[in-house]
Amino acid sequence: MGNTEVEVCDICLSMQDTKRLQVKRYRGQRYRNVCLPCISEKGLENIPEYNPTKLQEFVDEMEWDAIVPTILYDDNGKEYLGFANGQTNLLAKDKMRFIAEELLKTVELNGLAEFIENHNEKTYMIALYSRDPENTDKFLVPLDRLNIKRKQFKKNKVWGFTCGNCSTKISSKDGGEYFSISPSQIFNYGPTERACSEGCMKVIAKDIVMEWISDNDYHDDFDTDKLGRRITEHIKQA
């Protein structure tokens, strides 16, 4: 194994010669300091040591410290780009040179623009929608935002409506139940619609969702094959 450093062991908390053993994540780091006795006692001899590249060392060092762009001025007032850390201390010249050199390598990558666009779009979707448990590459349509309600006619109030799907005229005199749908702003839809049955409400709801998916080009983000079943299940719980 490689060199040791005298640090606090993350297992026994004693100050000893330790090695950095690689882990996925530990207290925000990618390694944990483990002393030689704990390595032997816990059978950790086969765990690889953490040997980061120069770029990984830089990322580790700056991961929890914001890099803020700032403007530097020379004696003539000319502007230059600089960077400060979260404590407003300017980054040293060697660090800024390292950032510039690494960024230059990055911007010359083929397909970088498409990768950035796809990454940012996925990040946006993750912030807004839940993952589909049946297909984690896709998201769940927020059916709760359709605001579908099952209602009962009030006998003391005479009124009626025309079903938004089948155009059947329904009156409170007939009694029974009906359904309403008032999509939230996310669906960019019009006023409340009403349906005479679960079946008709399913058609209306699916039309609204499919129009929303089409308008936003979400075809690759939501599993429309399961949409009918999920709308049916959602309406039954209304």
Image (cartoon, rainbow, N blue to C red):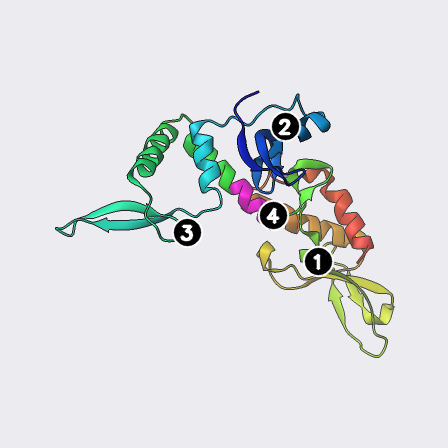
User: In terms of secondary structure, what is the magenta stretch mainly?
Assistant: helix
Please tell me how crowded label 4 is: few (under 14), some (14-19), or many (20+) other residues with Cα within 10 Å.
some
Q: Marks 3 and 2: which is nearer the front? A: 2
Residues drawn in magenta: 121-128
Image label count: 4
> What secondary structure is found at the residue carrying circle 4?
helix
> What secondary structure is found at the residue carrying circle 1?
loop
Q: Which residue is drawn at 54% across and 34% down?
A: 6
Q: State the CA–CA distance, disc 1 to disc 2.
A: 74 Å
**In front of the other: 66 or 222:** 66
- Name the residue type under label 3: Gly
Q: Where is residue 175 in the image (x, y as percent from the top left)?
A: 87, 68
Q: Marks 1 and 3: which is nearer the front? A: 3
Report which residue position mark 3 lands on.
Answer: 86
Q: Residue at x 34, y 33 (%)?
A: 98
Q: Is residue 14 above or below residue 231?
A: above
